[in-house]
Image (spheres, rainbow, N blue to C red):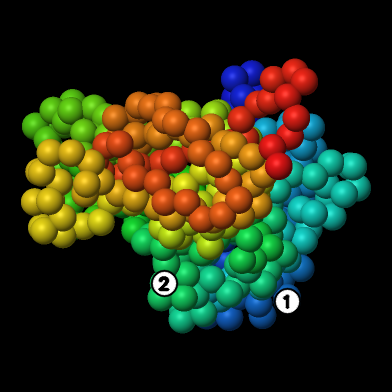
Amino acid sequence: LALAAGKIALLVGAALFGLTVGNVLLLQPLLLAEAFGTREYGRIYSVSQLVTALQKAYLRETVETLGDLDNVLWEISNESPPEAVEWEYGMIRTLHELEAARGMRHPVGMTAVWPPDGRGNAPLFHGPADWISPEDDAADPYESSPPPSTSRDKVVLSDTDHLWGIGGSPAWVWRTYFRGLNTLFMDPYRTRIRGNLPAWPLAASDHRSTISLPAPEWEDVRIAMGYARAVAGRVGVPSLRPMGALASSGYCLAAPGQEYLAYLPSRPGRLRRLLLAVPGPAFHERVELDLSAVVGVMDVEWIDPQRGLVLPSHSVRGGGHLTLRAPFDGDAIVHLRCAPRTRGEPAAP
């Protein structure tokens, strides 16, 4: 799969341990530990040198097979039990050592533990993984108000699987994007969902062919992710950083003085919906931007993330705070960048 995907520029996540591997000795520690009637994973693996040797040999063969490909992300095990954290740390370090010996480095990831044990995302942020997929909790509300990527030194893949199980919304896509994080949507696609769990067919008459494909209730999330990718193509992504303090909405990607991208989430509530029925822009979303670092004029465009439209607007002058109002209702994105100067034109004072 990684070989084929490399031809079309896709990243492939290689999950190394888990129920899909096939060899019982190479499963995540849960099954082996339960077979011995205990959940003391660290003790089991510390005395079972044969198992550890087999696991490391397996990692070595996998690295030798896929390690020359650029488009691979390693993942040790999806949602390992809390007791397996130290074991997973050891496997991550082993991968790092194996790749260092080959002179290559692929990001190694770790996902939230399951079931939760009260430590939240601390094992992820304090561990040796290069990228992580955290859970949602009061300290890290990745569902509703994600912490910015600059708050801690890990690449975050915000995966709906570890947040809701089955879930997500367009607002989650944009809030995640504007906090500098990466979105992963576990798309049910072909599967009926009941009570947030897959509802497999029970009889031939309950065949999946009767379901509209892909599942239409998640289409708005798919569209939002596509629009987010399109927006990324319009801006200078490598130079932008999450700087929520520069926008009154709290959602801003910026290269101060050069480029700003702000998200204006629509405010909920029945009164708000009634006000939007009034013709005109008076009740459209607005944002105050801190453009103190800007010298000169900036070009402005509005992006409608619900309809996929880009609307040019009038230029503005920087040097202070500026309030802008969206020209349409609902969620909005405003994009500002320094206006190009014509040849011979002096820099603005």
At 48% from the left edge and 29% from the top edge, which residue is drawn? 230
Amino acid type indicated by mark 2: Asp
Closest to the observer, 38 or 144: 144
At 36% from the left edge and 61% from the top edge, which residue is drawn? 144
Q: Quadrant of residue 313?
A: top left
Closest to the observer, 179 or 168: 179
Residue 236, position in %: x, y? 63, 35
Quarter placement of the N terminus: top right
Above-or-below relation of 202 to 151: above
Amino acid type indicated by mark 1: Val
Mark 2 = which residue?
137
Residue 299, position in %: x, y? 53, 32
Question: Between disc 1 and disc 2, whose residue precedes?
Answer: 1
Above-or-below relation of 271 to 104: below
Residue 114, position in %: x, y? 45, 67
Mark 1 = which residue?
47
Residue 191 in sight here: no
The answer to whether 121 appears left or right of 228 in the picture is right
Above-or-below relation of 192 to 48: above
